[in-house]
Image (cartoon, rainbow, N blue to C red):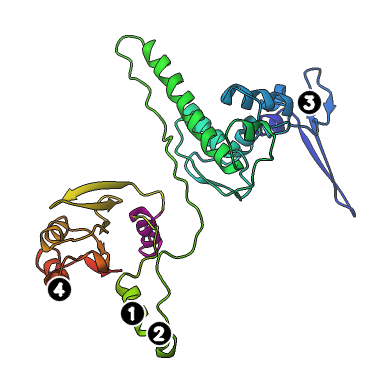
Amino acid sequence: MNDRVSNGQRLLFKNPKFVTLYYYLDSTGKYIAPSDLLNKDECGVLRNDEAFNEVKDLFGFPLFEYTKPASLVKYLIRMIPDDSFTVLDFFSGSGTTAQAVFELNREDGGERSSILVQIPDKCPIGSNAAENGFKTICEIGEDRIRLVGKNIKAQIDKENEQLELGAEPKPYPDLGFRVLRIDSSNFKDFYLTPGETAQESLFDFADNVKEGRSDLDLLFEVLPKLGIPYSAKIEERMLAGRKVFFVDGDKLAACFDANVGSDTIEEMAKAKPWYAVIRDSSMADDATHANYEELFRTYSPDTVPQVI
């Protein structure tokens, strides 16, 4: 835009209806209006039919008759004068935005990230997607992101094989992603009055976690309550025979295994995390319950221990 303005571009504003006219000089020195379309020659944006082939080549079979090209999303993202920000797409479809972000970061070394949101619409019976094993459009998006990441790695590997002597190999951009699904809380509703509670149901309250919920389910419910982003790095360590999640370095240590003894909690405390979380039903015995906070006061007084 700056180059065009310096070459004689004009912006005309007319009132009272505020009509905007935009002109630029062509190669012959004539003022002309630009095209209303984002085209391949001027903007590098593919047509929809070319985007169809782009997706077909990626998966090995056609999926959609109409799809927006990744080059269009890349063109729009480039309008932001930065290379480290988050792109939010509330109607992500098959994951075009994630592909655009991956490819841009690969091209310019940026650190952009993306958040994609999509209702799990079912693939129509008889469609190419359904015939190839995809149940929902979300599954297509997940597979597309994996395939794009795989292709980018292969491209970089090939370029690194052809490096000149002494040249630094090109690094991979961040190609990881996580898939989260909205659900109800992992914890049972215990806010009941005495009249709503029968004696035979008291044993149901021994464990406050709903059946079928995994350790990762619990962990991801804890993260936002502690101000830790879902994108934080998660590491698993074995401490005294029990699995402990360490999140974002030493920000959180969490253990949801069964029969967790004081030896595991002591090792967690010695790691000096900001926060420590353990499942109430995980503790092996009453002595472990009694020593839980005391162990942190002894080895890591700045840690905030919690029981869920």
- Are the residues at dot 2 and dot 1 in contact (C-beta closer than 8 Å)? yes
Find the distance from the CA under tag 1 to the CA under tag 4.
19 Å
In the drawing, what numbered circle is on residue 286? 4
Q: Disc 4 marks which amino acid?
A: Asp
Mark 4 or mark 2, which is nearer the start of the sequence? 2
The answer to whether 75 is drawn above or below residue 19 in the figure is above
The x and y percentages for residue 211 are 39, 62
Q: Disc 2 marks which amino acid?
A: Thr
Q: Disc 1 marks which amino acid?
A: Leu
Give the residues in magenta.
215-229
Find the distance from the CA under tag 4 to the CA under tag 3.
82 Å
Residue at the spot 59% in from the left edge and 41% down from the top edge: 135
Q: Disc 3 marks which amino acid?
A: Leu
In the drawing, what numbered circle is on residue 25? 3
- The residue that label 2 is drawn on is 197
Callout 3: few (<14), some (14-19), or many (20+) C-alpha neighbours within 10 Å? some
Mark 3 or mark 2, which is nearer the start of the sequence? 3
Callout 4: few (<14), some (14-19), or many (20+) C-alpha neighbours within 10 Å? few
Q: Is residue 221 magenta?
A: yes
Mark 4 or mark 1, which is nearer the start of the sequence? 1
- The residue that label 1 is drawn on is 202
Query: Which dot, 4 or 3, sits closer to the camera?
Result: 4
